[in-house]
Amino acid sequence: MVSMTQGLYRWGSAIKRGRKDLTSLIIHDAANLRYIQKFMKQRTKSKELHARASRVIPGGVNSPVRAFKSVGGEPPYIVRGQGSHIWDADGNEYIDYIGSWGPLILGHAFPSVVEAIEKANRDGASFGASTPREAELAEAVIEAFPSMDKVRFVSSGTEATMSAIRLARAFTGRSYIIKFEGCYHGHADSLLVKAGSGVATLGIPGSAGVLEEQAKYTLALPFNNEEVIQEAFYKFKNEIACVIVEPVVGNMGCVPPREGYLRFLRTITAQQGAMLIFDEVMTGFRLSFGGAQELYKIDPDLTTLGKIIGGGLPVGAYGGRAELMDMIAPVGPVYQAGTLSGNPLAMAAGLATLRELKQHPEIYQQLETRTAALVDGVLAAAKKKSVAMTANRVGSMFTWFFQPDEIYNWDTAAKSDTQAFGKFHHAMLEQGIYLPPSQYEAIFMSAAHTESDIEKTIAAAEQSFL
């Protein structure tokens, strides 16, 4: 959609050009409005559900971005998904480009994943004891990620990253960590520093309750900038335990590394005796079967995973070389535990998902082709309507940014027109296109999205650029 200023300029120009142009503009805008009104969805049940949830849950949500604060309005409450589509409590149908924030690479309710979960559930949902599938999934993950000799499963990406950092500090005997502005690695205290994503969406620089004593050991630096890394290692010589990075950032929108940047991080951490941690919670098994490290041919010291390895169920993992992982209890002195770690249902869902991806490697080429067609199609529609927009894409992760300039770090991403995005988001939602409710979140394609889905989405986008 155009901004109010753009709209006034357009109408003013039409008035100057004469009656014919003004009449055309009135007809054009009225047609667009009627088109979107035709698809206006009733969400009475969703509103009632949100009111109910708000009485007993902070903001009515269990994760802040779901509240739609950055785009306005109230969220639809989703009750069912199948393939690339979801349905809300009022029966409205949407083409889904969130996919539970990435893990549903095969689409909703994929048959073999559903079957695996149902079978595991019949055998017992949780034991708090070791089960055979834990080793099976660990072997599958290690096979796909040669940088790992061993892996430990946890229940979330936050647990994975905080555990990996604890391990890096223990192994190096150092205190400081480097993260990057706009990268989000979960809500552990030391990581909520210029964390992007939900934090950026809400306009909060960090978080209340995080002690300065904890945050002071976190150095938040601009992404894609080699010089600041060199300066940090010079200033804090022999004090930096690790560098943690999303190899392709997904939490300030999709932002890829510049050419050679990840290789630079690998080289300087090795030279300085610091650990390099790839947070592949989003990118693992999505950008390729071996994640971003296969795509960019970089072996980090530690890797954190999540999303897809749970097949839609809550799971996280961290892994690396044996000498590092053998410092984890009960073998070594670094303690980490979790009653639901290695949950049988999550292990079954993850195994079913990874088996499908391994047996059908053509899925990745299909994702590449269809995601490119969608991203380019919407960019062409924006250009046709004179809307300032650019896009970043790596594989099936992407973001449309409402600005014309290159996006390569948080400062450049933050220049995006979030009001324009909010209007676009709502117009797309009314036409049955479900996008992340934040300019600063990656968008995901699944193998279930069809060419028809893509065509419908591009057509909806063109109508949404009022």
Image (tube, grey):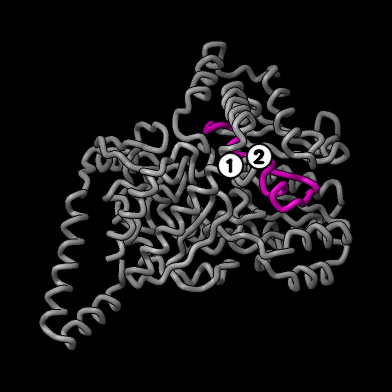
Q: Quadrant of residue 53?
A: top left
Q: Secondary structure at mark 2?
A: loop
Return the residue nearer the eye: 150 or 52. 150
Q: Which quadrant is the N terminus positioned in?
A: bottom left
Q: Is residue 208 visible?
A: no
Q: Is residue 296 visible?
A: yes
Q: Please state the horizontal and vertical placement of residue 140, each as a whole percent of the image.
A: 71, 29
Whether residue 449 is in magenta: the answer is: no
Mark 2 surroundings: few (<14), some (14-19) or many (≥20) residues within 10 A: many
Q: Residue at x 55, y 71 (%)?
A: 406
Q: Are marks 2 and 1 in contact (CB under 8 Å)?
A: yes
Identify residue for label 2. 289
Instruction: Residue 327: give its label.
Output: none
Magenta span of residues: 289-313
**Tag 1: residue type?**
Tyr
Instruction: Residue 364: give its label.
Output: 1
**Tag 2: residue type?**
Phe
